[in-house]
Amino acid sequence: MPICAPVKETAFETATAHPVVSAPDIEVQIAEAARFTRRHLIASIYRATSGHPGGALSCADILATLFGAELNVWPSSVNDPQRDRFVLSKGHACPTLYAIAAWHGFCDKKESLNLRKLGSPFQGHPHVKDLPWVETSTGSLGQGFSVAMGMAMGLRMQKIRARVYTLLGDGEMQEGSVWETAMCSAHHKLDNLCAIIDYNKMQSDALNEEICGIAPLADKWRAFGWEVFEIDGHDIPQILSTFHRAATTRGKPSCIIANTIKGKGVPYMEGSPAWHGSVKLSHEQAETALQALGCTAEEIKEFLDV
Amino acid sequence: MSENNAPALIGSSGDSLREAFGKELTRIAPEYPKLVVLDADVAGGTGVHHFRKAHPDKFIQCGIAEQNMVAAAAGLAATGMIPVVTGFACFLERAYEQARLSVGYARRNVKIVASHPGLDVGPDGGSAQALEDLAAFRAIPGMVVISPADPIEQALATRAILEYDGPVYMRTGRSGSVRLFNDDHVFEIGKGQIIRHGLDVTLVACGVEVARSLKAAELLAEEGIEARVVNMPTIKPIDEALLKRCVLETGCLVTAEDHNIYGGLGSAVAEAVTKNRPCPIEMIGLKDSFGTSGEPDELAEHFQITAPYIAEAARRAMARKEHLQ
């Protein structure tokens, strides 16, 4: 990914002062990308009048770090066979993917606000035929993980050293096929595969543990033969160093259990499953969220004026 | 245990469609360096044990986990490989949603090849008899659906699906198969052929029902009825032009398939015919029922999909045609 953040073009792209480009600080840049991502996804979900803000906000720091420092893919290299792959297995968090992709120039920032609209390639779940930089179509939980495993197999068979990353939701752990894939990946010693779990502890209707308990999660993945890392999914330096440790793990796939907060960054959403589902944000709610994310009045107007 | 004491595997007939598929896939594999075969612990039953032996580095054992296998195939295809997913038809249906989203919707170059389709499974019984697979896979946009009739055609179709760029569902078969075609037979995706001429009625069939339709045509010939027989190995896209010609020239049709009468070949033919010039159509297949245990031939008789029933359906179709005139 580009080391230098994109140059600020209009007010809504970033609200804070741009970091000094001559002395790039990757952690600062990732934090800035994450801030942009949160603002962008709130704006796109508001404009769409539907979407899943809670689980989109919880994975913003993970995706910002992944795209900001880990993946070797650029807008110019989306068809390069040597590129790393990222699969958003929790496809409903695509506003986060669209936002971080826009930040890095894979798509247009303004166009990607056009979420869930007829004629827009930014569907409610990502589709590879609409957006060529999306690695596969997702939106049915569990499948992206299996597809990512197949990619890891295909790369290894072709002696391509690229890595495959996939982000799963915690509710997704309840899909049986996840464990088929977990078992098969470990059996085939796919050390080029890294699964990240956005462990925000909540799913559509309630807490994971109320719906169908998934704990102890780390024990489960270890028992399935994976190298497991448990981290704070909002701590960018920790995410960075864990990606490095996962990339140097040999002989087995890696699972990063990222402890996160659902709705992270928007206080009234934090820790509430109510903001998981496809919800409609009122103008006031969107405005409050953008204020909490540090937007100025001018920036809020630009984001929310349709 | 000595080798002599090993249990005899049942149904490993040398001239089955699965053997034709497995052997041809193994033979032509060197021409397709990106080919990879996926199995869910049924390689001995699908014919790909030949492939595993000859090309172990291109064979992926996925374990008994069809959902993961089908979506993983989509991932393999995304990296440029040509994955052939193999399994028993009924268990591959378990991965229908993976076939829909990860293969069909993403339009991945994945070939799903299903053995043990229809009543062909025999004694394993109704639980294992996939009588809805053609309907299910036909409903996935862009999915090609093929059911060859004999080992020669199965081998030709095996190459054809590797040459074709896009998702395919193809049936093979478990039982010993009647040999219908010679080495000069041609298979082209989307094309049917007239394999017996006649002007009174057209019998349109796929898979094991092609041989039964030829027998039905012989029965009909004894009473002076000239039945045309069309081999229709591609259920989707269906050969509309050929069907149109058959309707014009014979005025009525019978469809025959080892499948539910809903959603498979009969439905595909009816859809095509009603779009052009409608005519009486009778359908041979399971009448919205599940299967049961029995030998395949006994089951075919029990569920009334053998030659006498096809012939009777032809007489009905002809009577309806005359009624219209």
Image: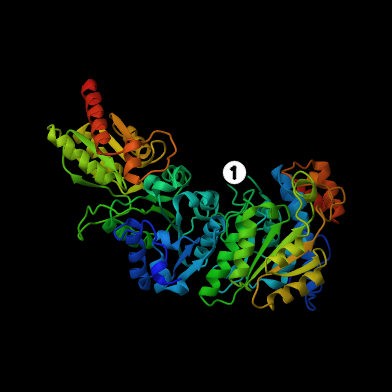
**Where is residue A125 shown, x and y percent of the image?**
63, 51
Instruction: Chain letter for mark 1, please.
Output: A
Q: In this view, does B295 lie above or below B249?
A: below
A111 to the left or right of A200? left
Quarter the C terminus of chain A occupies: top right
Q: Which amino acid does label 1 sit on?
A: Leu
**Where is residue A171 shown, x and y percent of the image?**
72, 52
Quarter the N terminus of chain A occupies: bottom right
Camera sees residue A93:
no
* Label 1 sits on residue: A118
Q: Is residue A114 above or below residue B223?
A: below
Residue at (73% x, 48% y) in the render: A52
Q: Quadrant of residue A31?
A: bottom right
Residue at (81% x, 74% y) in the render: A20
The residue lying toward the viewer, choosing from B78 and A230, is A230
Residue at (64% x, 46% y) in the render: A116
**Where is residue B109 shown, x and y percent of the image?**
45, 60
B135 to the left or right of A136? left
Residue at (30% x, 42% y) in the render: B240
The residue lying toward the viewer, choosing from A76 and A169, is A169
Disc 1: CA contacts within 10 A as few (<14), some (14-19) or many (>=20): few
Coloration mode = rainbow
Q: In this view, does B199 lie above or below A71?
A: above
A223 to the left or right of A27? left
**Where is residue B218 shown, x and y percent of the image?**
17, 40
The residue lying toward the viewer, choosing from A124 and B317, is B317
The residue lying toward the viewer, choosing from A238 and A171, is A171
Dot 1: element: loop
What number of labels is visible?
Answer: 1
Camera sees residue B154:
yes
